[in-house]
Every structure is written in structure tokens, then in C-alpha cells.
Amino acid sequence: PHPRGSRIASFRSHTSSSPAMMAPQDFQTFVFFDLETTGLPPDRPRITELSLFALHRHSLLQCPPQDAPAPRLPRVLDQLTLCIDPQQPFTPEAARITGLSQQDLEENGKRGLDRAVAQALGGFLARQAPPLCLVAHNGWSYDFPLLRTELARVGAELPPATGCLDTLQAMKELGLGGQGGYSLGALFRGLFGRDPDGAHSAEGDVRTLIAIFLARAPQLMSWAAGKARAWGDVTPMYLPTTDLCPHT
Ligand code: DCM
Ligand code: MG
Ligand code: MG
């Protein structure tokens, strides 16, 4: 039933009412992910790096208490990290915080976000025990809409019933913020008393997100069971105006 890899028919919701909510369910796999990009939404950003770590609920619930200052990730996890030529310049701020540049990606022979990326992503997700929930910090406002835009560009889609959990939203609603607020860095500092490693690298941010999630796993997983949204209800960040021809 999953139209993986098929062309997108439309962006309409697959549910007729209550577009933000899915039927409550216990997700088996949580796929933590983060995107690095060329800029912020008004810049119509392109993806420059993506990282996904898939963890089964078994590991998320069995993980021993995290001892500051060295969070340990569960032993059993799958990960996929890719660098991507955005085919457009970075904003100065995006280049500064990520340490990437279009020239650097080009010189390393990186290719654009093509169908091979969509297929790798689809294959990675298909290996995980369903049902799946994607997890991203500020995901509803940034990572999910942008990934949908970029997949649309190459005529690819994810299964519409895939769950989407925004940990920024969840932590706010659950009142789980640190003293410095709800940013990834502030939440990590509140728990572990130091800055996270690898900030603004996709893999670094995912590792930080998992460390935070593990400290609150039962609460966040039950929040996800009732409040995750469906991938099919994610509105793309913007619609690509060019590059829609399947030349890749
Ligand atoms: N970003 C930006 N300017 C900021 C924060 C983020 O342009 N002040 C863009 C570039 C990052 C992307 O958002 O690659 C994702 O942010 P983060 O590294 O927090 O995941
Ligand atoms: Mg991010
Ligand atoms: Mg990041």
C-alpha cells in the first residue's frame, strides 16, 4: 500500500478531516533526523547534508540512565548520512554555522539531491520495523516541509502514514525545557552541563537530539503516540519553480 518512489499525485491530505492528527499508535521505530541547508525558509533553502538514525522502541526504553557528561547511544542503531551539492549558494550565516560551502561540496564530487538519494532514503526506512515515526527538532516548521519540497523535486514521496514528531513542540507542551529555553543546545546543556559536540553538522545534531530524547523517552513516546502528525499532511516549505524535469 505504500507508494514508495512513485510520483506525487498531489499534496492534499490523505485524511479528510482533522489534518493534524493521526490515529493513536505505538510507533515501533523512531527515525531521528536533521538537515543542514543553504539558509532559512525565506531563502528557499536547499539541503546540503542529511542524517537519519533509526532506533527501535525497545532500545529507547531500555537505555540506562544517561550519566553526565557522556551520553551513550544504544548499541543497535542504523544510520545514514549524506552530503549533497545544493546547486545554489549558501547564505553567509548558513556557511558559517555548518562549515560547508557549495565549492567544498563540488570539489568533493558530491552530487545533487537526485532520485538515488530518494531511493536510499526509501530503502533505509523500508528496513525499519513499522510503524515508523520521524523525529526532528523544529521539524514541523523546518525539516519535514523542506524534505517534502526536495523529494517533490525528484518526484519521490514517503509513505503518507509515516508519523512526524517535532521534539521542539513536544518538549514545550510537556514543559520539559532547560533554563536556557528549548533549543537543541539549551536542552542538552540543561541535561549534561556542557555544549553538545558537532553542532550544525547533521549527524552531530541527530546525536544530540537522541541524547535529549533518551532522557525523556517514555514521556516523548507517549506524546508521539497521540500527537504525531502524518507525513501526508506536511505542507511543503515551497514549491520548486524549476528543475521539475526528471533529468537525474
Ligand atoms: N540556518 C540558518 N541560520 C541559522 C540557523 C539555521 O541559515 N541561524 C539553516 C542552516 C542550517 C539549517 O538551517 O544548516 C538547519 O539548522 P540546524 O543546524 O540548527 O539543524
Ligand atoms: Mg536542525
Ligand atoms: Mg543541524
Image (spheres, grey):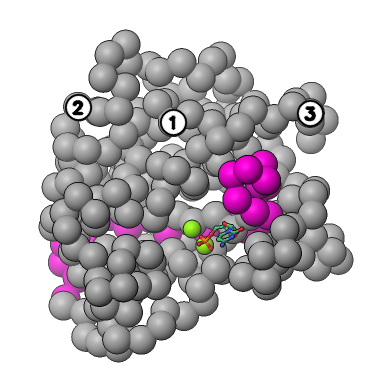
Pointer 3 local density, CA inside 10 Å: few below 14, some 14–19, many at least 20: few
Quick one: quadrant of the C terminus? top right
Residue at the (38%, 16%) spot, across then down: 14
Q: Nearer the viewer, residue 140 or 32?
A: 140
Label 3: element kind: loop
Marks 2 and 3 in Cβ contact (< 8 Å): no
> Whole-Å distance between the Cαs marked 2 and 3?
36 Å
User: Given the image, on which type of amino acid does mark 2 rest?
Assistant: Ala
The part of the chain drawn in magenta is: 38-64
Which one is earlier in the sequence, the residue at label 2 or at label 3?
Answer: 2
Q: Quadrant of residue 212?
A: bottom left
> Whole-Å distance between the Cαs marked 1 and 2?
16 Å
Label 2: element kind: loop
Residue underneath mark 2:
23
The spot of residue 35 in percent (x, y) is: 55, 55
Residue at the (37%, 46%) spot, across then down: 134
Residue underneath mark 3:
242
Q: Nearer the viewer, mark 2 or mark 3?
A: 3
The spot of residue 185 in percent (x, y) is: 39, 72
Horizontal side, residue 31 vs residue 67: left or right: right
Residue underneath mark 1:
234
